[in-house]
Amino acid sequence: MKPRFTTALLLLPAAAWFVAMLVLPLIVVFVFSFGERGPAGGYVPAFSFDNFLNLGARWTAFKNTMVLAPIGTIACLFIAYPLAYFLAIRASAKWRTMLLILVIVPFWTSILIRSYAWIFLLGGKGLPSLIAALGLGHIQLINTPFAVLVGIVYGYLPLMVFPIYVSLERLDKRLLEAASDLGAPPLNTFLTVTLPLSMPGVATGCMLVFILLMGEFLIPAMLGGGKVFFVGNALVDLFVQSRNWAFGSAVAVALVLVMLVTVTAYMRFTRRWSGGRDDISLM
Amino acid sequence: MTDRNDFISREKFMEELMRFKKGSVSRRHFLGVTGLGLATTVLGSTFARQAMAQANIGDRVVLASWPNYHDPADFESFKAATGAAVDLNVFGSNEEMLAKLQAGGTGWDVFVPTNYTITTYVELGLIEPLDMSKIPNYDPNSFDPRFASPGTVDGKIYGVSKDWGTTGMATNTANNNGKALTSWKEFWDITRAEFSGRTTVHDYQLTTIGNALKYFGYSFNSVDPKELAEAEKLLLDVKPHLFAITSDYQPAMRNGDAWLAMCWTGDGKQLNRDMPEIQYTLGKEGGEIWSDFYAVPVGAPHRDAAYALINYLLDPMINMKETLFHGQPVADARVNAMLTPERLADPILYPAAELLNALEFGAARTLTNPDRAELMARFKSA
């Protein structure tokens, strides 16, 4: 009995946190989603499925998110992988720590401030004026889906770099030597040894970035000029602008369901992909 | 202490200042007659500080307000005078403020609602009728009733007038042969032609839909489904040509990315002051006129400090500093009497009567109308 009691006691803070910060709010959101908007906004108790039947009114927001979130995740992956590879395998031990710190440094400043910096970098007096000065024509960068993508990659890159770095750093370097000794050219070594062994990191990084991206609202609002509309933006507008908390809750419940389905499918896929190992996404 | 908040003209003020400088009147007399007694840091007076400190209002007051809307120096002098530091929370829309108050637990002591929200706050029981004995600086007779009256509901005063303004358009005339636009028809048409990719509209259903309705000559406040459908068609047609849907349009106007913005008076004044080629005009079809108020939410944690702050900001000398800072006109005749004739003739702050008369105050039902909210969501996600 005693060890079990100790275990329970040690788990108490986590359990209390889990109930207060996750379970209770989710129950509130779930209950609200069957309610109605009050005449001046807010929430009035009711039991109706109208909010769910009306979800089509936010279809575009879901569609935009379901397109840009995977694109953003893949863009992050393609930029983060070579960087993580360089940090873990190529960089000298002397430089490695400092380079890793440099990857984290942007996190020390709020994403809001850093997004403002991008507004000026991508604005007419920033990169486009440089491009025009080079005689490459006039282009608009700010307030486009491209600008949102740049902001996403910039903001989420460290979340992709670190899991991949950790899996590459753990990799037994003798395996690479063995591959080379057995006559495998570098590309083959990478494709048959390094890449498969770093898959847990890739899977974790992709999941971290994708899940957070699905709820993103700040970057589209700031770098998309309010014209790129994610589910996150729809939720902000429903809760603080039109104050239709009941419908907002229904959209939130729908988003949670979409994520559950996507993430479950993703975990099944990555498990099969890595030959039945289920530690992949949980690393 | 006598009432030292009586109106004093600029001439009288200078005369009193000279008398004081020459030593013919006491400092106490000078501060008394000029109303500077409350603005203690202006002259570093100590006697008024003692007077106000007697009340002991605590060390903190939380104010929820709008961007670029207060002179920080006035908060500093309030703190010097009363010991209460002003904790300013900045908001982007009335809906956001309403949502926060509906959810509860804001911790706000004073906030700045716009005319069309007051009745809703009263109905929901979110604001308290003001205890006017604690706001002696509010003189109902000196406030223009056109701007002050929405603060009164069922004979009770819930809000005292802060300032007022209009919603028009700011044109960078350098991009339009030196001409500013003069109608909402022009605004929406030029956006789909020469100004494609250069126009911003508010991220705010009240004004963006309202000014789209003006294109067809409908009421700014219309909730008629047929009229809203026409406005929606226009907005969806214009959307690909917009630079942004944002209420933070000053940066884009200043760096030249945007040439035309749906704009509030204060932003128009600030832009025009720094870049004279940006001109602020009203649509001749009409549009919005609004007034903002100081109000106290029910259950304000620092209630005494809330009243002290409102009273302080309504002191005509302080209110004059405020209006010079934020660039919105105020409804207080005592303040206007101290402003220069050039300021009072500024067409940005005080538009011509025929333009002003065409404007409408936003209505409570316009703000809370669910159809307009959904229209805005469709416009933004299109």
Image (cartoon, helix red, strand yellow):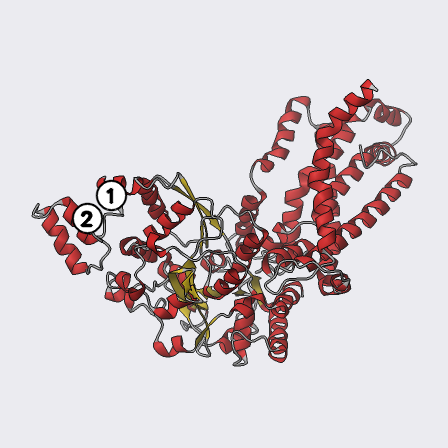
The amino acid pointed to by label 2 is: Leu
Quarter of the image with the C terminus of chain B in it: bottom right
The image quadrant of residue B227 is bottom right
The image quadrant of residue A276 is top right
Check disc 2 and report the residue beneath it. B31
Q: Chain of mark 1?
A: B
Check disc 1 and report the residue beneath it. B48
The answer to whether residue A142 is left or right of residue B128 is: right
Residue B128 visible in this rendered orientation of the protein: yes
Considering only order in the chain, which callout, 2 or 1, is on the residue closer to the N terminus? 2
Residue A108, x across and y down, in percent: 57, 35
Query: Relative to the observer, which residue lies in front, B292 or A214?
Result: B292
Residue B165, x across and y down, in percent: 40, 66
Residue A1, x across and y down, in percent: 84, 20
Residue at 75%, 29% (x, y): give it: A166
Residue B269, x across and y down, in percent: 38, 62
Query: Relative to the observer, which residue lies in front, B5 or A172?
Result: B5
Q: Residue furthest top?
A: A2
Query: Relative to the observer, which residue lies in front, B3 or A53?
Result: B3
Q: Chain of mark 2?
A: B
The amino acid pointed to by label 1 is: Ala
Secondary structure beneath label 1: helix
